[in-house]
């Protein structure tokens, strides 16, 4: 084939592939099979390799290309990516006797707009709020120039290579496109694709994603576009940024033009002209959205006339011409078929509801935590009940209440001890419930179930991030006797992992997968992540050890006080913190003037005397600990648990094994190094003595920001109160932001936060 013939053939193949792409991804009416499509693509790729001069950037072969990036470049948005004001649908409970309607916020918003415009509203649009990740694409002269994440609204990450892998996104727009066209939308995963992805991951021993949004965000953050191309992402466009020549007069005009530019628009879109039409449209959307193939969490309402956007303007965060009406989390009724008991890493027995599968907020749910026996009693949840479930924060399914009208006649209250016949369901060991505790616990230190969950925790993303160490692998490592104490996993060889014969897994579809060997490829990756874990800081190792009550925050505080893991094991501070906690508990439990029950005068006098001695000791301890400026994250119970761990056989074995492997986890926030502690003036730290609350969606995990605040001398708590100094607020901040504004707590956005740190 000569150059001319090759060019003709290449053009023909590109056109053909483009057409089939369009039919498949935009029209959902494919005409050829996947293998026929692959064959055409293969032919084109071969021809382009033979004639490299004919290669163009928007060729279908260029969707996945180039080596993995080492980091994302930043892109400044030419037009800021604002978020939208949230208006929350009222819950059923909030309606009772209040005389309010569920969409009251919309009525208020409508009259505010009307007032601002000084008259009637000519038109509004209503469309689904897609629960995905915002992206902004820039097309210049029809060609995709770049794609960026929202970031802090001003600057985002350059994710062009990742976005190019999404086949519903055109790399070139038709000729009627504006020469400069910044189009924005939501990247997401269809529910079905998400379920399949998770089933695949679980059958490979990888951890499942929590929901489609997390899976999308995680995918877009991948530095390797090849990995992204294997994940089923899609995008729906809903707004625009910079448009040069021929911008749009109305939102509906923009929406209508999208398909002619081969850009996917939401099929559900309404224009309304009155409040009653608006309310009807929102109600219709709430009804219809459950049949959508992707997750939605609200309705976005926009003033249709773009000229009026200017007139209405915007606040620092939101445009005044749009709002998002957020629907309450979806609730569904289903049957509680049975209850299984999970044994946690600390031996806690957790009842889990086994439900008749039900589709809710985008995924099929067949299990939900019941927390503990007390909680079950409070809600009177029984086997055989019809229960109402909801996804708390649209993420974790929870049983909300029982529909008592549907209760079967002979059901009995749930008694956990009786249910498990007084034995741990995993090892038949003894179970106990401490006074004042709600949970039953298995006391057997060598309980295999505990070993599995401990090992899972040891390798989880939040701790040592050991790749591929999922449930199936952890179970086999414990079952085969290779790993009783999680640290033993560190010295295993690639071949030990590769040879594991994993049990068949139950897929979401209900099918059972084949038994499978873990294999060399995954074993190599696992071993590599073990090597990488060597260098992780002390706090990660401390939280990995599965010490009861030691989560990420306590681990960070503990690592602030100690230089290395062996220093924690022989700490001078921890015994003092533990002792003080115990004394404080004694005083609480033995009041001199008890509110309930009577004590004799003699007993009163004795308590008074003992309390005085104990108080003196507490004072003494507090004096000696005071230069440490301890955070409440590391209290008496936590300190006692750490001491107990390092005195136990498990703890001793852990230390000696780490020593043998020459692993000495070191603190990266040690107070003597960063100047936050004894001998230093704590006020030298930028956030010294300040209390923070974090809310909303930020560009990185909350844990990331929490760590930054704590390392810089601040404290992070869960709710906004008079004691809060700052609220770090990301997108979609809800009630905490409202509370902060109400009581005049300073609200800090992410750029401001970075500024505060930089300044210091
Ligand atoms: S319009 C200034 N329309 O929700 C308004 N946004 O909470 C521009 N979102 O950052 C956005 N579905 O990423 C718009 N139909 C929709 C949307 C939508 C989801 C996201 C968007 C935005 C966030 C704000």
Image (tube, rainbow, N blue to C red):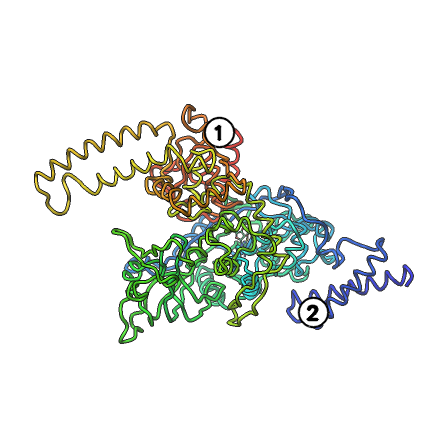
Question: Which of pointers 1 and 2 indicates the residue nearer the eye?
Answer: 1
| Lateral position of residue 527 relative to residue 178, left or right | left
- The single residue placed furthest to the left in the displayed view is 601
Find disc 1 in the rendering and name its residue.
674
- Mark 2 residue element: helix
- Mark 1–mark 2 distance (CA, rounded to whole Å): 57 Å
Q: Quadrant of residue 215?
A: bottom right
Question: Where is residue 171, by image quadrant?
Answer: bottom right
Q: Earlier in the sequence, mark 1 or mark 2?
A: 2
Number of residue marks: 2
Q: Secondary structure at mark 1?
A: helix
- Quadrant (top left, top right, bottom left, bottom right) of the N terminus: bottom right
Q: Residues within 10 Å of mark 1 (few under 14, many from 20)?
A: some
Q: Is residue 649 visible?
A: yes
Residue visible at 39% across and 64% down in the picture:
389
In front: 594, or 269? 594
> Which label sits on residue 34?
2
Let me know if residue 124 appears in the view.
no
Q: Is residue 486 above or below residue 691?
A: below
Q: Nearer the viewer, residue 426 or 115?
A: 426
**Residue 189: image x %, image y %?**
57, 60
| Residue 213, percent from left and from top | 53, 56
Horizontal and vertical percent position of residue 441? 33, 56
- Residue at left offset 37%, top offset 57%: 90
At label 2, counting other C-alpha atoms closer than 10 Å, the crowd grade (few under 14, some 14-19, many 20 or more) is: few
Q: Residue furthest right?
A: 2
């Amino acid at each position: 084939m000569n150059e001319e013939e090759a060019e003709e053939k290449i053009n023909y193949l590109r056109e053909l592939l483009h057409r089939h792409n369009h039919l498949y991804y935009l029209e959902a009416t494919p005409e050829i099979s996947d293998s026929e499509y692959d064959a055409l693509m293969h032919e084109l790729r071969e021809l382009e390799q033979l004639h490299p001069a004919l290669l163009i950037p928007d060729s279908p072969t260029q969707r996945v290309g180039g080596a993995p990036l080492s980091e994302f470049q930043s892109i400044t948005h030419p037009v800021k990516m604002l978020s939208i004001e949230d208006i929350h649908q009222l819950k059923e409970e909030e309606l009772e006797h209040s005389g309010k309607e569920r969409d009251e916020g919309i009525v208020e918003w409508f009259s505010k707009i009307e007032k601002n415009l000084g008259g009637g509203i000519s038109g509004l649009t209503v469309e689904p709020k897609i629960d995905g990740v915002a992206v902004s694409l820039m097309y210049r002269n029809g060609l995709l120039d770049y794609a960026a994440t929202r970031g802090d609204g001003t600057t985002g990450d350059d994710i062009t290579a990742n976005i190019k892998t999404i086949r519903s996104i055109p790399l070139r727009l038709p000729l009627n496109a504006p020469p400069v066209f910044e189009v924005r939308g939501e990247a997401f995963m269809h529910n079905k694709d998400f379920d399949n992805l998770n089933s695949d991951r679980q059958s490979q021993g990888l951890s499942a994603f929590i929901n489609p949004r997390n899976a999308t965000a995680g995918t877009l953050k991948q530095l390797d576009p090849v990995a992204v191309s294997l994940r089923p992402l899609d995008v729906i466009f809903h707004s625009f940024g910079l448009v040069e020549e021929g911008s749009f007069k109305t939102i509906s005009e923009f929406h209508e033009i999208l398909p002619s530019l081969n850009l996917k628009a939401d099929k559900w879109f309404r224009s309304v002209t009155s409040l009653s039409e608006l309310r009807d449209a929102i109600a219709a959307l709430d009804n219809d959205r459950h049949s959508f193939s992707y997750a939605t969490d609200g309705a976005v309402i926009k003033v249709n006339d773009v000229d009026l956007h200017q007139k209405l303007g915007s606040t620092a965060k939101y445009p005044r011409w749009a709002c998002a009406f957020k629907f309450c989390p979806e609730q569904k009724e289903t049957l509680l078929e049975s209850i299984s008991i999970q044994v946690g890493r600390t031996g806690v027995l957790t009842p889990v509801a086994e439900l008749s599968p039900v589709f809710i907020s985008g995924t099929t749910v067949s299990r939900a935590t019941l927390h503990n026996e007390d909680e079950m009693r409070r809600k009177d949840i029984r086997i055989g009940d019809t229960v109402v479930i909801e996804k708390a924060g649209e993420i974790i399914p929870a049983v909300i209440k029982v529909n008592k009208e549907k209760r079967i006649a002979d059901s009995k209250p749930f008694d956990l001890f009786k249910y498990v016949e007084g034995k741990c369901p995993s090892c038949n060991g003894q179970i106990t419930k401490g006074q004042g505790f709600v949970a039953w616990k298995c006391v057997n230190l060598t309980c295999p179930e505990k070993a599995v969950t401990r090992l899972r925790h040891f390798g989880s993303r939040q701790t040592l991030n050991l790749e591929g160490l999922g449930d199936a692998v952890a179970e086999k490592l414990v079952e085969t006797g290779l790993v009783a104490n999680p640290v033993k996993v560190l010295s295993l060889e690639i071949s030990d992992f590769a040879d594991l014969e994993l049990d068949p897994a139950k897929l979401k579809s209900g099918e059972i997968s084949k038994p499978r060997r873990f294999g060399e490829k995954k074993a190599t990756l696992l071993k590599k992540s073990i090597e990488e874990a060597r260098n992780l800081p002390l706090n990660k190792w401390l939280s990995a050890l599965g010490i009861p009550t030691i989560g990420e925050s306590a681990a960070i505080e503990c690592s602030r006080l100690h230089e290395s893991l062996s220093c924690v094991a022989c700490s001078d501070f921890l015994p003092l913190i533990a002792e003080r906690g115990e004394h404080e508990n004694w005083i609480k439990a033995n009041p001199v003037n008890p509110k309930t029950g009577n004590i004799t005068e003699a007993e009163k006098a004795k308590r008074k005397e003992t309390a005085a001695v104990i108080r003196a000791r507490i004072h003494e301890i507090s004096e000696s600990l005071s230069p440490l400026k301890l955070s409440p994250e590391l209290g008496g119970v936590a300190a006692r648990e750490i001491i107990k761990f390092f005195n136990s056989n498990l703890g001793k074995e852990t230390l000696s094994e780490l020593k043998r492997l020459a692993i000495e986890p070191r603190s990266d926030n040690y107070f003597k190094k960063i100047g936050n502690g004894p001998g230093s003036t704590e006020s030298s730290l930028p956030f010294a003595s300040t209390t923070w609350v974090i809310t909303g969606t930020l560009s990185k995990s909350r844990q990331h920001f929490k760590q930054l605040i704590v390392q810089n001398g601040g404290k992070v708590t869960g709710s906004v109160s008079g004691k809060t100094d700052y609220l770090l607020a990301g997108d979609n901040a809800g009630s905490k932001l409202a509370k902060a504004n109400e009581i005049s707590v300073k609200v800090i956005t992410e750029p401001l936060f970075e500024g505060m740190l930089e300044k210091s």
